Image (cartoon, helix red, strand yellow):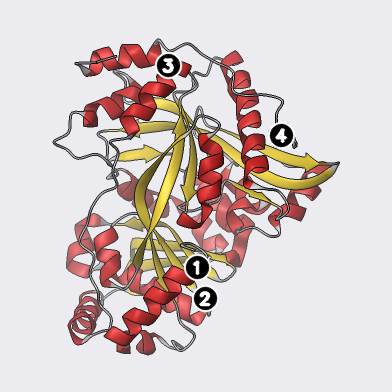
Amino acid sequence: MICSTPEQFRREINSGRRLSWRRGRSVLKGVLLGQLSGQELADWNLIAARASVFLHAGYLNGLTSQLPDGDRFWYCLFYKDGSACGIAVFHLTTFRANKSQSINDDCVFTDLLRKSLTGNRTEANVMICGNAFATGEHGFLFLPHITASESMEGICTVLSDIIDRERKQGKKISAVVAKDFYPRNKSVVKALEKCGFRDFEVDPNMILPIPPEWRTFEDYLESMNTKFRTKAKAAFNRSASLSIKSISPEEFRRESEHFYALYLQVTSRAEYQLGVLTREAFVALKENLKDRMIIRGYYLGDQLVGFLSAFDCGDRLDAHMVGIDYELNKSHGIYSSMLYEYVRLGIQMQKKWIMYGRTAGEIKTTIGAFPVQLSCCIRHPGKISNLLLNWLFAYVKPNAFPVRDPWKKQTHTELRRRIDEGPFCC
């Protein structure tokens, strides 16, 4: 089939015959839940104790305390031989796009990608296995004795049930996405491909290893070469008039409108949006997680001009949502100050890794973060549509950006080794 226009391509996408995904082949029993409570909550917590904060009930309950219109979460507990062996979270949300972020602008497929999901509208319903608000593998966790084939067969069987339930409620799902997989999880990606998914690379997660010899922020700076240490000090001078304050749950609730307005300044600049938190959910996250969610407010005098947030995830510090007053960002170096503040926090908390997320890759390399490859898996609920989507995504490429190297040679070698031998790339 040859489509010469975006409109023709969209017609072919949407005319695809619907099909049921493979059923009944999973050795796992999946129990779908609309909320976490009772015995199911106890079983969930048993598995989630091994997971990062993004699969903990406190985080999920805060996230879902007030969802945007049309959003819905499904939870699934998996059992094998009567014992809980895995958990997964699925988020039905709205994809909003101005243009495709991941395809070369001079390619005809730019328009096709957007319109394959949204048609002539600016949005479409997308089912995510994973977290729309965080970068990384936060969609599911299975106990070690469950193989990749067994776990993904269970995921695909459950997705079939969710799609049917949503269709009966009038929700047409344009695509199903499982995100984000590091290179170490090739077996999971291959198992999803057997269920009809297509994998494609997305922008990498920017990760900074924290070696144990960095006991202070000054140790970090001393590991940089002269050029980038000078750049860091220039950034500190620009932000010298800012004061940084740790924010309590009570303060966050009291000033939530100001914090949320700064958060929206950031999300409104995104080329696409896959889930935007409500203000109420934003506040509930801090109240539920308390010290495990860190918030720092940036003030110019008494004026709140920015904030950063992060999650305490065991040996990792996950950088999360930020808010920025862009009218003051350039003159006061708000965002640059935040990137260095994450380093300061990571060292103080004796973390092994800082997970910076996938945006603004170039500037994150200037503070020392390394890009680590990520891939997602996608499929369309229709048979013909899925074939076309697979063909289309053969052309999807992550954004390219210059990678800076701020390190002394010995430090670079050591940090590169930690990345290559860490829990991501092996």
Residue for badge 2: 351
Tag 3: amino acid: Ile
Mark earlier in primary sequence (3, 1): 1
Tag 4: amino acid: Leu
Instruction: Judge the density around disc 3: few (<14), some (14-19), many (≥20) Cα neighbours within 10 Å.
Output: some
Residue 229 is labelled as none
Quadrant of the frame with the N terminus: top left
Residue 121 in the image, given as x and y percentages of width and height: 32, 20
Q: Quadrant of residue 24?
A: top right
Q: Is residue 172 left or right of residue 266?
A: right
In three-dimensional space, the C-alpha distance between marks 3 and 1, rounded to whole angstroms, equals 42 Å
Mark earlier in primary sequence (4, 1): 4
| Disc 3 element | helix
In three-dimensional space, the C-alpha distance between marks 4 and 1, rounded to whole angstroms, equals 30 Å
Q: Residue at x 38, y 29 (%)?
A: 390
In three-dimensional space, the C-alpha distance between marks 3 and 4, rounded to whole angstroms, equals 31 Å
Residue 160 in the image, given as x and y percentages of width and height: 61, 25
In three-dimensional space, the C-alpha distance between marks 2 and 4, rounded to whole angstroms, equals 34 Å
Residue for badge 4: 33
Please identify, in this view, whether the residue under mark 3 or under mark 1 is nearer the observer.
3
Mark earlier in primary sequence (1, 2): 1
Q: Are marks 3 and 4 in contact (CB under 8 Å)?
A: no
Q: Are marks 3 and 1 in contact (CB under 8 Å)?
A: no
Please identify, in this view, whether the residue under mark 3 or under mark 4 is nearer the observer.
3
Residue 317 is labelled as 1
Residue 384 is labelled as 3
| Disc 2 element | loop
Q: Residue at x 45, y 34 (%)?
A: 378
Closer to us: 6 or 28: 28
